[in-house]
Image (cartoon, rainbow, N blue to C red):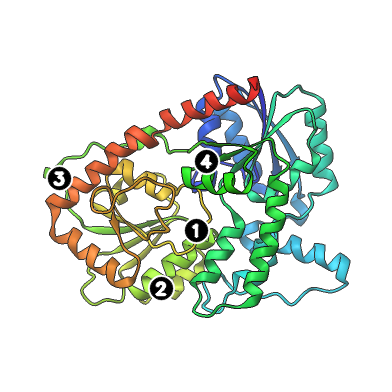
């Protein structure tokens, strides 16, 4: 079976949830399925990542289109939000001037997600160069299925042949993210609701054109089935590599740190971590250090440098030393569906999960059995103190969570599900 996969991001290194979701299935099924992957190279980092992928995926046909040149190159990290810049350029063509859109760092208190065009409307047309390159890939090889990944690529359904079945993998519902952001604010604004409705209308219109949608959880699938009752919608969860499972021993178990996994660029991470540091870490008898693992801006690191308990590690190759004997906090207030990699990693590694209701959305976790629930600052404080003072009970919770991971969320089981779904769609 020949499948063309078109992700929005280069999934290497697999250092955040979106990348892991794309990377995991190709990496584990590349010996069974003839994959072709089409990438857009936006900067030199993308080019280097693809070079690495070609060495570890010799079985995969990797095709690229280059969207930059070295002479005028400016990396995404240096230029800020590349999607936002595309939005400004697009709007400028039709309006003749730049719209008044806030560009403050997303960690600022006055940041309004609803006013960030790059995030609320990630459906801008691709360049002619991109579409021409994609059409060339499709014309030069026979494909049984075409799979699109991530919201920013949703509009590609309008460039795909009618005679090939098209799959969309919903890693995140963008209108749900904006809706949750609006709900988290103290004041309700009619403008926010307008933006939610606008993003939702565009997103659903494009989703409707796909033959099949893969949802990452039962809850996401139920939501989509209510919207599209006649469409084929399957649950296909992703997972982390099974090698992350740590052997747990109660004689070596204790709680001596707090960990937050995830990059700043994912808005729910930025919102949740800022809230947790400002509302929970300020409490006088929280003595544990908080390790923030992932890429965060210098501005954010400096903002919290006054608190010596908060340590930004950046990207790390090995999470094991950090997750051993730790609490993994999931202070997520803004959803969007999908499954959170930070929860999968905590379950596998035996790190105690303390999460908001929205944070564990999509997982079949039971409070006080496989995790601890905390929906406000007081709850987080109480659960942290409980974990510190009740080692035996805490160990039982992390052990139960790891057992659940092995039975329901392991990569071997998730890849088996995806492999069988491909053949069901191919033969239908």
Question: Element at badge 2?
Answer: loop
Name which of mark 3 and mark 2 comes first in the sequence: 3
Residue visible at 58% across and 48% down in the picture: 226
Q: How many marks?
A: 4
- Quadrant position of the N terminus in the picture: top right
Which-is-in-front pick, marks 3 and 1?
1
Q: CA distance from mark 3 to mark 2?
A: 32 Å
Q: CA distance from mark 2 to mark 1?
A: 24 Å
Residue visible at 28% across and 53% down in the picture: 367
Q: CA distance from mark 4 to mark 3?
A: 32 Å
Which-is-in-front pick, marks 4 and 1?
1
Please name whichever residue, 369 or 291, is drawn nearer the observer in this view of the structure: 369
Quadrant of res 114: bottom right
- Quadrant position of the C terminus in the picture: top right
As drawn, is 340 to the left or to the right of 209?
Answer: left
Q: CA distance from mark 2 to mark 4?
A: 30 Å
Name the residue beneath numbered marker 2.
304
Which-is-in-front pick, marks 4 and 3?
4
Which-is-in-front pick, marks 2 and 1?
1
Q: Is residue 251 above or below residue 63?
A: below
Residue visible at 72% across and 48% down in the picture: 206
Name which of mark 3 and mark 1 comes first in the sequence: 3
Residue visible at 23% across and 53% down in the picture: 368
Q: CA distance from mark 3 to mark 1?
A: 35 Å
Q: CA distance from mark 4 to mark 1?
A: 17 Å
Residue 199, visible in the rendered structure: yes
């Amino acid at each position: 079976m020949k499948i063309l996969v078109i992700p929005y991001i280069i999934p290497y290194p697999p250092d955040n949830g979106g990348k892991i979701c794309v990377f995991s299935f190709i990496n584990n099924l590349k010996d069974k399925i003839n994959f072709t992957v089409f990438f857009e190279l936006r900067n030199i980092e993308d080019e280097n990542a693809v070079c690495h992928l070609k060495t570890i995926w010799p079985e995969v046909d990797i095709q690229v289109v280059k969207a930059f040149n070295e002479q005028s190159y400016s990396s995404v990290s240096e230029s800020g939000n590349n999607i936002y810049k595309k939005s400004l350029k697009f709007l400028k063509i039709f309006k003749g001037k730049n719209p008044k859109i806030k560009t403050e760092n997303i960690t600022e208190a006055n940041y309004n997600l609803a006013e960030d065009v790059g995030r609320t409307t990630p459906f801008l047309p691709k360049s002619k160069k991109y579409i021409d390159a994609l059409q060339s890939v499709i014309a030069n090889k026979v494909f049984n299925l075409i799979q699109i990944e991530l919201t920013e690529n949703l509009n590609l359904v309008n460039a795909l042949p009618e005679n090939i079945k098209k799959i969309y993998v919903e890693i995140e519902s963008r209108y749900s993210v904006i809706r949750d952001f609006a709900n988290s604010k103290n004041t309700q604004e009619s403008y926010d609701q307008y933006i939610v409705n606008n993003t939702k209308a565009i997103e659903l219109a494009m989703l409707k054109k796909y033959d099949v949608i893969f949802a990452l959880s039962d809850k996401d699938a139920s939501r989509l089935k209510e919207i599209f009752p006649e469409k084929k919608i399957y649950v296909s969860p992703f997972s982390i590599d099974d090698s992350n499972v740590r052997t747990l021993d109660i004689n070596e178990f204790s709680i001596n740190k707090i960990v937050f996994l995830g990059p700043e660029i994912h808005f729910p991470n930025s919102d949740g971590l800022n809230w947790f540091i400002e509302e929970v870490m300020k409490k006088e008898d929280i003595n544990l250090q908080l390790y923030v693992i992932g890429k965060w801006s210098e501005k954010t690191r400096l903002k919290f440098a006054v608190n010596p308990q908060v340590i930004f590690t950046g990207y790390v190759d090995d999470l094991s030393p950090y997750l051993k004997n730790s609490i993994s906090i999931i202070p997520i207030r803004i959803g969007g569906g999908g499954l959170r990699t930070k929860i999968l990693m905590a379950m596998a590694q035996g790190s105690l999960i303390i999460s908001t209701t929205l944070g564990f959305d999509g997982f079949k976790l039971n409070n006080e059995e496989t995790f601890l629930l905390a929906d406000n600052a007081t709850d987080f404080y109480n659960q942290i103190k409980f974990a510190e003072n009740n080692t035996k009970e805490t160990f039982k919770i992390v052990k139960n969570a790891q057992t659940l991971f092995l039975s329901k969320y392991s990569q071997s089981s998730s890849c088996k599900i995806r492999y069988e779904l491909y053949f069901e769609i191919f033969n239908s």
